[in-house]
Image: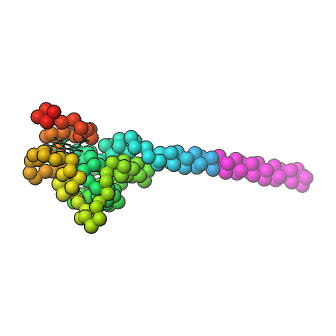
Amino acid sequence: MAFLQKIFRNYVFTTTLVVVSISIIIGSQISQALSYSLAQVNTNNYQLGKELYLQNCSSCHIPIPAEVLPTATWQTILEKPGRHYGTSLPRLSNINVRLIWNYLRTSSRPLLERELKPEFVTQSRYFKALHPQVHLPQPVTHQSCILCHPGANKLDYVSLSSEFE
Ligand code: HEC
Ligand code: HEC
């Protein structure tokens, strides 16, 4: 009997060992695959970032184009979702924040040295620079963009209303 017990114990031990090793191997492969896909997504997937921006940043106001504000302003907006112009934004996953950041960073320009960081589009010299000789209704807010940019809701700021074409 003692002999059989020993074989049985050995059997249980070996099986456990095999199961544990297999799960470790599978587990590490899954996490490898995951970190691989995260790394792939991370590296400048501009189009995906833009789509996520559109999905997450256009429900309360039109999607504001990256070009009209300096990179530093976008950074603050993404870093402080809890303090968003008097309201609070729903939390985004880390990966979504990074993709959106990639889109915003790629399409905006840095602040000049000693330049004050604009909070609103109207205060931004990039917004002004994109509208040379355009007579803008005052005050300019994100609500007036659509008057001249009929595609603003879809982040299309190239199309212009007929009076400008
Ligand atoms: C829950 C609603 C809500 C969501 C979602 C939201 N915002 Fe806002 N946002 C506001 C409000 C409210 C203001 C204040 C301006 C206003 O509408 O009067 C504002 C203002 C802004 C402004 C300044 C606009 C201007 O007139 O100069 C920017 C830039 C901005 N949001 C970017 C973003 C970005 C980027 C996201 C996505 C990460 C986002 N917002 C998502 C509510 C929201
Ligand atoms: C009174 C009309 C008018 C209003 C209001 C207006 N725009 Fe424009 N916008 C124009 C015109 C016209 C151009 C093209 C200017 C040029 O090419 O010289 C332009 C160009 C742009 C461009 C560059 C597009 C490109 O070709 O890449 C962006 C971005 C833009 N506007 C964003 C905005 C945003 C954001 C708002 C609202 C805060 C806004 N505009 C409000 C008329 C307007």
In the image, taking residue 60 as reference, residue 35 lies left or right, namely: right
The answer to whether residue 162 is magenta is: no
Q: Residue at (33%, 48%) from the top-left corner?
A: 107
Mostly what secondary structure, the magenta segment?
helix
Of 32 and 10, nearer the camera is 32
Magenta span: 1-26
In the image, taking residue 81 as reference, residue 143 lies left or right, namely: left
Q: How is the image coloured?
A: rainbow
Q: How many marks?
A: 0
Image coords of residue 88 (percent x, y):
27, 57
Q: Residue at (18%, 39%) from the top-left corner?
A: 149
Does the image show residue 92? Answer: no
Of 91 and 57, nearer the camera is 57
Image coords of residue 136 (percent x, y):
11, 47
Of 132 and 158, nearer the camera is 132
Ligand 2 placement by image quarter? top left
Image coords of residue 110 (percent x, y):
32, 57
